Image: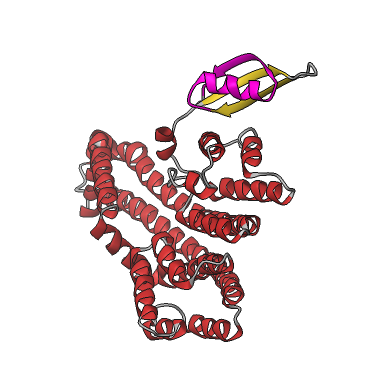
Amino acid sequence: MEFQYKAMKPNGDIIEGIFVADQKQDVIEMLKSKNNYPMLVEEKKVVGTKEITLRQGIGPKDLAFFCRQLEAMLRAGSTITKSLDIMKRQITSKVLRNAVVEMHAEVQKGKQLSETMKPYPKIFPELMIYMTESGELSGTLDVVLERLAVYFDKNAKMRSKIRSAMVYPALLFVMSNAVVVFMSVFIMPTFVRMFEGSGVELPGLTRVMLDVSKVIKTRWYIILLVLAILALAIYQYVNSENGRLLWDRLKLNVPVLRGLNRKLMTARFTRNLSTMLASGVPLLTALNNLANIIGNKVVSRQILDYRQQIQQGKEFHEVVRESRFFPPMLDGMIEIGKESGTLDDVLAQTAEYYEGEVDVALQRMVALFEPLMIIVMAFIVGFIVVSMALPMFDMFQTIN
């Protein structure tokens, strides 16, 4: 438990602080052992618990801030305990702040920083825990934290680019559906009354649109319920073992998204592997860790297959070349890196290249989706307009 205390030093100065102990008496004895007079000792009320924290995640920007701040304080000569104590007052994310408060308490008890991260798998990714542990063992924790900060910064930028690229197509999709609903609910009923009073037989296309308009207007709640059930069923299936494997396989093989996802996986593979190797993590361990964090079941199985073949004596670049899973450039770069003894640097350069390729691919995809969605919208609106215009032409012919 954490106890807040206020005490008076022999020279009359007042000191305040926090001390971790099993009971209040331990804090009092600690203060007296330092010739301080206890004035106030009470249990600190911590907002949030591990249980609450575990249900929530945070973004790469928050993790980059955490790593950069901690690295800066360690380089300045601060201890981990002191650094965490300062950081828990600076962090704006409530979830991360609550975790740091508990981590600070555990570090005061003598635990390593990496150990205190493990109870929070939804906050600190496995990559971060592995690398922190490696930095603690090698005495280069500040260097590892700097690499992690760069890694999370690049991760945040990549996510931002992907989300920004998807905004316009998503907006066009919503607008096209909104147009259909608006014309079906507000425009079509006006023409229905006119058609019904004309005595003209309606074309099949118009009858279809009138039926759609009627269903949307009178059974909209059923449509929403069906869509919600369908979305929930898809979500549950995609999050199952077989469903996730099928979804990840589709992402890598669907013609429109295949090139983008392959480049994205290559960039993620090289960036993560480079970061771990540069921090002193052995290749086999790095591959095993990478399989757990890559974010694609198909790629994860491929990485584990690489690891198994390397254990059997094959060279890294050979197994990558034989699999033909990643672009041909990658195995050549791995071979160059192995021969020169700079595999981590070469992989980092390869990651930079493929991250640039992902950026270009995203721009091309958006450029492709823009005219495609406009054509779809034009087709939908045109279909509705034609369905309303056909009976009007029949009415004019009848009048003539």
The colour scheme is secondary structure
Please give the name of the residue rendered at 28% of the width and 46% of the height, measured from the top-left corner: 231
Q: Residue furthest right?
A: 11
The percent position of residue 125, horizontal first and vertical second, equals 47, 52
Q: Toward which corner of the image does residue 298 lie, by quadrant?
A: bottom left
Near-viewer residue (356 or 386): 356
In percent of width and height, residue 13 lies at: 78, 19
The picture places residue 142, in percent across and down from the top left corner, at: 65, 55
- Give left or right: position of 284 versus 361: left
What x and y, as percent, mark residue 181? 35, 42
Q: Residue furthest top?
A: 39
Is residue 56 toward the left or the right of residue 334 in the image? left
What residue sits 68% from the left and 25% below the top? 34
Pick whichever, 29 or 336, lies toward us: 29
* Circle count: 0
Answer with left or right where residue 6 lies relative to residue 27. Answer: right
Tell me if residue 35 is in the magenta stretch: yes
* Residue in the picture at 54% in, 47% down: 113
Q: Does 322 sit above or below residue 199? A: below
Q: Is 277 one of the magenta-colored residues?
A: no
195 left or right of 252 in image: left
- Rendered position, 289 above or below 194: below
Task: Mark yes or no: residue 398 visible.
Answer: no
* Image height of 363 relative to 215, above or below: below
Answer whether residue 324 is visible to the viewer in this image: yes
Is residue 355 placed above or below 28 in the rendered structure? below
**Bounds of the magenta segment:** 21-45
Instruction: Identify the residue at image location x=25%, y=40%.
Output: 223
